[in-house]
Amino acid sequence: MNAMSESRVRVGLIIPSSNTFSEAQFNHFAPAGLGFHVTRARIAGEWKRPLSEMASEIATAAKLLSDCEPSLIVFHCTETSMTQGPRGEGKILDIVHDATGIEAMATSRLVLEALQGLGIKKVVLLTPYKSNKNVIDYLNSSGIGVVRDVAMGLDFSAVAGRARLAEGAYIAAQIRDSLYSVWDWQDWVYDPSNGSIVARDDRSAPLPYNYFVFGISRMS
């Protein structure tokens, strides 16, 4: 489909005002005939507040999206909707539907439905947030246990001096607090023969802690 051709099906997204990724990514990966249309709202980060204070802004964002006549509106701010808990999440969807008459979904509920559909009862949680408490509370209240969690504390703010990750691969290990001051990644290397992290001086000794590898790359 020509990138400028008319979409046969339209989906509206309400995203945090600071989100610069979702609009491009959704439209990049969308199948032919499906278009994503975005309205931003101050509903996350420094702007996250009690639902009663965000309700008007959410309703306004939904109304703006309704002007392009989407078949569905998605509240695409997972951490904020999870913070409200399942009942608060339902209220967010009611706000969107009542303002537009259009069916509404939330990414938080879609995550939950995916886990339930796969029969998953326990998860290991990895997020870019500074704290996972709200997400854990949401999952626990919905019958999903969190065995381990890692909050990476990444900064997605618009502050000019914020730290930015360079492109490449990164390794994060979950170690004991007592090791923070003496830990040295120079003692460990990647073994491409089995895809694991091992001691530099003893390639038969694997890293004895939970760890994960993630990559940063440009979207082509």
Image (cartoon, rainbow, N blue to C red):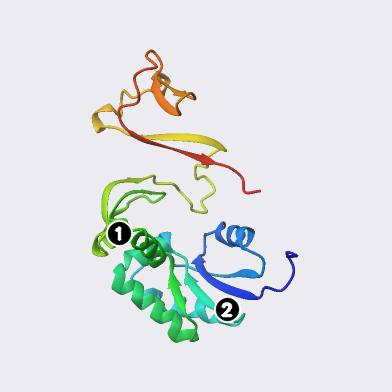
Residue pictured at 32% horizontal, 56% vertical? 120
Separation of marks 1 and 2 at Cα, in angstroms: 30 Å
The image's mark for residue 70 is: 2
Tell me the quarter of the image containing the N terminus: bottom right
Residue pictured at 51% horizontal, 35% vertical? 169
Q: Which residue is mark 1?
A: 134
Q: Position of residue 54 (x, y in %)?
A: 40, 74
Mark 1 secondary-structure assignment: helix
Mark 2 secondary-structure assignment: loop
In the picture as drawn, the residue positioned furthest to the top comes out as 201
User: Is the C-beta separation of discs 1 and 2 under 8 Å?
Assistant: no
Q: Position of residue 5 (x, y in %)?
A: 74, 70
Identify which amino acid the numbered label 2 is placed on. Answer: Pro
Give the answer, above or below, for where 204 lies relative to 95: above
Quarter location, residue 64: bottom right
Quarter location, residue 4: bottom right
Q: Position of residue 184 (x, y in %)?
A: 37, 22
Give the answer, above or below, for where 156 lies relative to 117: above
Of circles 1 and 2, the one toward us is 2
Identify which amino acid the numbered label 1 is placed on. Answer: Asn
Few, some or many residues within 10 Å of mark 2 (<14, 14–19, 20+) = some
Give the answer, above or below, for where 27 lies relative to 212: below
Residue pictured at 61% horizontal, 62% vertical? 30
Give the answer, above or below, for where 128 lies relative to 34: above
**In the displayed structure, does residue 156 sit left or right of residue 167?**
left
Q: Nearer the viewer, residue 76 or 155?
A: 76
